[in-house]
Amino acid sequence: MSIDHRLSDEHEHLRATVAKFARDVIAPKIGEFYEQGEFPYEIVREMGRMGLFGLPFPEEYGGMGGDYFALGLALEELARVDSSVAITLEAGVSLGAMPVFRFGTEEQKRTWLPKLCSGEMLGAFGLTEPECGSDAGGTRTTARLDEASGEWVINGTKCFITNSGTDITGLVTVTAVTGRKEDGKPRISSIIVPSGTPGFTLSKKYSKVGWNASDTRELSFDDCRVPAANLLGEEGRGYAQFLRILDEGRVAISALATGLAQGCVDESLTYAQSRQAFGRPIGANQAIQFKIADMEMRAHTARLAWRDAAARLVHGEPFKKEAALAKLYSSEVAVTNAREATQIHGGYGFMNEYPVARMWRDSKILEIGEGTSEVQRMLIARELGLVG
Ligand SMILES: Cc1cc2nc3c(=O)[nH]c(=O)nc-3n(C[C@H](O)[C@H](O)[C@H](O)COP(=O)(O)OP(=O)(O)OC[C@H]3O[C@@H](n4cnc5c(N)ncnc54)[C@H](O)[C@@H]3O)c2cc1C
């Protein structure tokens, strides 16, 4: 048995490379994109060239041959500086490409994965609808197989879909009701809809509180037709598929949340040592020192939680409970650290030009997206054997 807290040389190299990229390339530019609400194409292209979008996929599909742990390391270092680019990567990999990799036919994988892995193309996953999010089994979007033409005919609306409307978005996988079981419950399936398919329209970008340099849209499907072969995996298995995708996605969101929490420590440390009040740095006051010590404690513990869940995932062990624990803990920690970091920055913390202001705005969604904190608590309680 080996016990080791250190990263492998390969993982450490990746972590350090992404950290440098985030510091040198993203940090100086991202504030401007964020303020304008613009998608940072050049930065995303560069992340593609670095291989980040292909991290957990095999080389035969254009990936880097890494694993989910590697993805988590990259997400943490990106979010330490900026969450918009981190969520673009997270959604592109775990919601866009992963369903194709996990459930696609060989032909679907060969068609889509090389471009998704290189970052030339972004993928999205459309589960949430205006009237159902947490209760995603309540999907109202329908897909009917038109036997005559051999096409799915999709009707419905999806909302809040990340990466769905950029210039480089190539596909959205949508969940839709494709029939009813004997007990009347819906049969949900996942279907790949290529961007630009007639009948598939995008709304303009939402005005969001945070993640302002990422792309989030409402999607409408009005007799949208795609070939029968665009079904992802088996008909009626869509519910089980997205549960798996969300379990994995929670590990990734947890790594991202940890990065934000750590970024708050980084910014606060620098500021506390330079800002003077009453003739000395504010960091000389124990009240500020204790705030930062607690922030570091929370970021460290969140890191242990996501790495534990990721290690279980990579080793093929059950990880559902650990993913929910990590997501719940790290997202709440991110919100707390962002609030404390803003407080340490005083009035400057309320100015958008300071990274902590961006982190504050970006933190709240972490308690909502890919399963709210309440949903995580429900999952943990269920895993502990409590039934409601
Ligand atoms: C910026 C952004 C990006 C997103 N990206 C994507 C994406 O790419 N793809 C996608 O499919 N979705 C995406 N989402 C949607 C997101 O996953 C949902 O918003 C989230 O799952 C919550 O669903 P809801 O908004 O419908 O809230 P609801 O499910 O309506 O919940 C409202 C409140 O009720 C609580 N609640 C609900 N049920 C219970 C219960 N049984 N017990 C206790 N409390 C309960 C919730 O926890 C929450 O506090 C995104 C959302 C945002 C804001």
Image (cartoon, grey):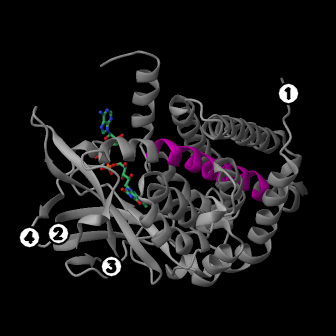
Q: Amino acid at mark 2?
A: Gly
Q: Secondary structure at mark 4?
A: loop
Q: Is residue 29 visible?
A: yes
Looking at the rendering, in which quadrant would you find the C terminus? top left
Measuring 63% from the left and 34% from the top, which residue is drawn there?
Answer: 312
Q: Is residue 209 visible?
A: no
Kind of residue at disc 3: Lys
Provide the residue designation for mark 4.
148
Q: Which numbered disc, 2 or 3, marks the residue that appears first in the sequence?
A: 2
| CA separation in Å, label 2 and label 1 | 54 Å
Rendered location of residue 215, percent (x, y): 45, 72
Is the residue 388 above or below the residue 40 in the image? above
Q: Main secondary structure of the magenta part?
A: helix
Whether tag 2 and tag 3 are in contact, CB under 8 A, the answer is no
Among the two numbered marks 1 and 4 on one chain, the one whose residue lies closer to the N terminus: 1
Which-is-in-front pick, marks 1 and 4?
A: 4
SS for callout 1? loop
Q: Position of residue 332 (x, y in %)?
A: 56, 41
The residue under label 3 is: 204
Q: Secondary structure at mark 2?
A: loop
Q: Residue at x 47, y 53 (%)?
A: 365
Mark 1 is surrounded, within 10 Å at the Cα level, by few (under 14), some (14 to 19) or many (20 or more) other residues, namely: few
In front here: 110 or 77?
110
- Mark nearer the N terminus (2 vs 1): 1
Q: Nearer the viewer, mark 2 or mark 1?
A: 2
Residue occupied by mark 2: 150
Discs 3/4, front: 4
- Counting residues from the start of the chain, the first of labels 3 and 4 encountered is 4
Segment colored magenta: 246-267
